[in-house]
Amino acid sequence: MENALGEPQTIVLLGGTSDIGRAIVDELVSPVTRTIVLAARRPDAVEAGPLTAPERTVDVVAFDAADTASHAGFVQDLVARHGDLDVVVVAFGQLAEQDDLDDDPTAAAALVHVNYTGAVSVGLAVAAQFRRQGHGRLVVLSSVAGERVRKSNFVYGSSKAGLDGFAQGLGDALAGSGASVLVVRPGFVHSKMTAGLKAAPLATTPTKVAAATVAGLRRGRRTVWVPALLRPMFAVFRHLPGVVWRRLDL
Amino acid sequence: MVTLLTGWGRTNPSATEVLEHGGEDVDGLARIVKALPARGGVARGLGRSYGDPAQNGGGVVVRLVDSVHDVAIDAAAGTATVPAGVSLDDLLALLVPRGFFVPVSPGTRFVTVGGAIASDIHGKNHHLEGSFGNHVRRLSLLLADGTVAELGPGERPDLFWATVGGMGLTGIILDATIRLLPIETSRCSVDTERADDLDTLLTMMDEGDRFYRYSVAWIDLMATGSRLGRAVLTRGEHATVDQLRPKQAVDPLVYDARQRIAVPPLVPPAGFVNHTTIKAFNELWFRKAPRRRVAQIVSIPAYFHPLDFVGSWNRMYGRAGFVQYQFVVPFGQERALRAVVERLSATGTPNFIPVLKRFGAANPAPLSFPRPGWALALDIPAGARDLDALLHGLDEVVLDAGGRHYLAKDAHTTPGAIRRGYPRLDEWRAVRASVDPAGRWTSDQSRRLRLLAD
Ligand SMILES: Cc1cc2nc3c(=O)[nH]c(=O)nc-3n(C[C@H](O)[C@H](O)[C@H](O)COP(=O)(O)OP(=O)(O)OC[C@H]3O[C@@H](n4cnc5c(N)ncnc54)[C@H](O)[C@@H]3O)c2cc1C
Ligand SMILES: NC(=O)c1ccc[n+]([C@@H]2O[C@H](COP(=O)([O-])OP(=O)(O)OC[C@H]3O[C@@H](n4cnc5c(N)ncnc54)[C@H](OP(=O)(O)O)[C@@H]3O)[C@@H](O)[C@H]2O)c1
């Protein structure tokens, strides 16, 4: 159970090697934290060291977002070992060059499967547990890429658009259950995912995304944009006529 | 019905199935208890604890719906047998006109007798008369197996004292017989003094508290510089008839405790209660107190429950809610008290009229909060900046001094802090487990603070 100051006891990171995800965990950790679960498809790549502390368990577990059949059992197993889940962060995701996906429908489908289907499946399993325990916060890393999908990364963007819609709808469905969903919409973030890519305007860092996310959790927000300026910008982008949007080089 | 419950501080809600039930229907209650779901159940009174002891996410909460008409007063013995769901508000309306007062009164009348026992509440008379549990002659407790146990200081004392201060985790208190205080009038005679700083205040309380049944001080922790710790000390006693003006003496036990106004359910704009507004309030509160006044005659509600004149005042803090930080440090640890006061003042954390109380002897209950020493309580908006770091830091100061935190107020601390503050926790756990081995009594607080087991 999270305390009155919004400090969770149990934090679960799905995508245990995600730069943004780890920054969020760092920001959330407090003297109250008893359990941190780092769930990754390559558990041996997870560095748990910096998070260890007396009276705290750091549990590194195998988790593959693509293996949707395992998700319900995966969540049940976490609960059996650690009790209530206070904050669960969905930080896994894949990005690919749109050019590479144009001629590879299978790869495109696999990416969408992880980013969207995998999040739907594990998100529902977590929500079911939140209902059982009467509380819990799900943080979903969406992206401005899904707010208005661009031609330069429309497969990734569409997977985020679907994810964003799912997360908002789930949040609405959970109203009154004690559980809630926070949708985080960052712009370009310097991380493993974007290494080697040309930074977009207003590029930000995992630490800043984490600070905004935790502030959003504490204030009970439903959405967070990082940086905040992206929100009014995308309010405009959303309504640009197609001819203009297509010509913008974003 | 599944309801989102919070404590009085309106923070960290959880969804709980709330079952309302008359305490006199023991068989019906026993059926509920035997059918508790895996996440268990806990009793809830009027939800005046600040944090999460009376909620149980995903489980059950039982609210006793009891009637004050079932209270039995034994005037000769000076006791009353009260169903546990009855509020002190209703009880006082019954008792005061008959010349009796409750043995211990908290800062609000809107608590139940069950909640008063489960939190082993204290009042302004703790230095002389101890906490609520000291005045309980007997009680009946519905156990996890559906049977009812008769308990008292001389009857199954282990389980009795585990229930006093046991935060609902030994069972549901059905009724209790409590000792009453005979009073001649419904008024109090109050002496007020100001102290210019904390040291002066502590000396005044050390030297003078024993001459008064009731004593409490308000400190201004938002004043800065030389005014830091300035305080208003009010001490009093129930007035006797000959202290009343002739007009008052006509009906010496008249009692009128109506709420005057209520804060509407609209949530005020975030930050309405902020540094500036609280500082202004503290200033007003301080100024309205006379520098020195002796034998002022005031009503029971005005003296004991001034906050109750405003209904739902907890809404003033807006959506983020608020926390109450309350701790006690032993005598001899005044340095720790001063350190807390200085840190609160240095960080400029907004805090609402802090109350300082000088506690007397502890009772035998392992989880009872009061112990000899200085107890400080203050309300802080939960959204205050860097409050998490501040409170965890203060926790260390308090625990290093051999102090502890009050479970009825706690909403932020850690299992480790409770273990350190309550060295008899394991003793309590053993008694508790003997009547509830499966751990069916649970609350969000018991899960958060690992009260039942590590
Ligand atoms: C304005 C204000 C001033 C206060 N001043 C003081 C003060 O001066 N001194 C002080 O000590 N406290 C004070 N309190 C705290 C309050 O007295 C306690 O939190 C008290 O327990 C609240 O009683 P309740 O009936 O609302 O119980 P709840 O808050 O509903 O429950 C509190 C605990 O009691 C248990 N409980 C309730 N009923 C039963 C039952 N029938 N059987 C078993 N367990 C039960 C619950 O499970 C829970 O653990 C104050 C609170 C407020 C809001
Ligand atoms: N960086 C940005 O600019 C940006 C902007 C907006 C939104 N986001 C979103 O933010 C989230 C975190 O991204 P990031 O920047 O932190 O990138 P990152 O460091 O690359 O993190 C992505 C994580 O997803 C994991 N992952 C990929 N496929 C998986 C699978 N099938 N099962 C389990 N885990 C899988 C990766 O694990 P491996 O280590 O095994 O690859 C990696 O830990 C992503 O959802 C991303 O889309 C990022």
Image (tube, helix red, strand yellow):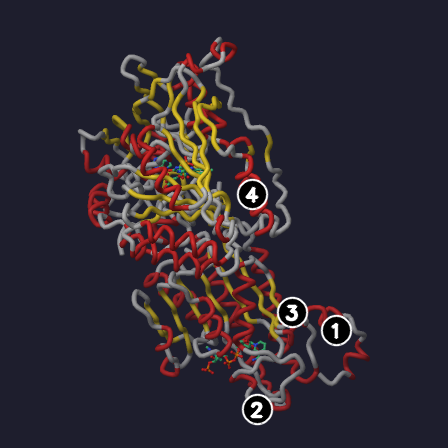
Q: Residues within 10 Å of mark 4 (few under 14, many from 20)?
A: some
Q: Position of residue B284 (x, y in %)?
A: 57, 40
* Residue named by callout 1: A237
Same chain for marks 2 and 1?
A: yes
Residue B283: mark in rendering: 4
Between discs 2 and 1, the one toward the N terminus: 2
Q: Is mark 2 within 8 Å of ligand 2?
A: no
* Residue named by callout 3: A228
Give above or below for B237 relative to A219: above
**A28 or B325: nearer the viewer:** B325
Residue B214: mark in rendering: none
Kindly report which numbered mark, 3 or 4, lies closer to the viewer in this rendering.
4
Which residue appears at 55% of the width and 73% of the height? A208
Q: Position of residue B324 (x, y in %)?
A: 44, 47
Q: Which SS class for mark 3?
A: loop
Please state which amino acid type lies under the numbered disc 1.
Answer: Phe
Residue A196: mark in rendering: 2
Q: Residue A82's image quarter?
A: bottom left
Q: Residue B100's image quarter?
A: top left
Q: Is mark 4 within 8 Å of ligand 1?
A: no
Between discs 2 and 3, the one toward the N terminus: 2
Marks 4 and 1, how far apart in space? 51 Å
Q: Residues within 10 Å of mark 1 (few under 14, many from 20)?
A: some
Same chain for marks 2 and 4?
A: no
Q: Output the chain of dot 1.
A: A
Q: Are marks 3 and 4 in contact (CB under 8 Å)?
A: no
Please state which amino acid type lies under the numbered disc 4.
Answer: Glu
Q: Are marks 2 and 1 in contact (CB under 8 Å)?
A: no
Give above or below for A47 relative to A170: below
Please state which amino acid type lies under the numbered disc 2.
Answer: Gly
Kindly report which numbered mark, 2 or 3, lies closer to the viewer in this rendering.
3
Marks 2 and 4, how far apart in space? 59 Å
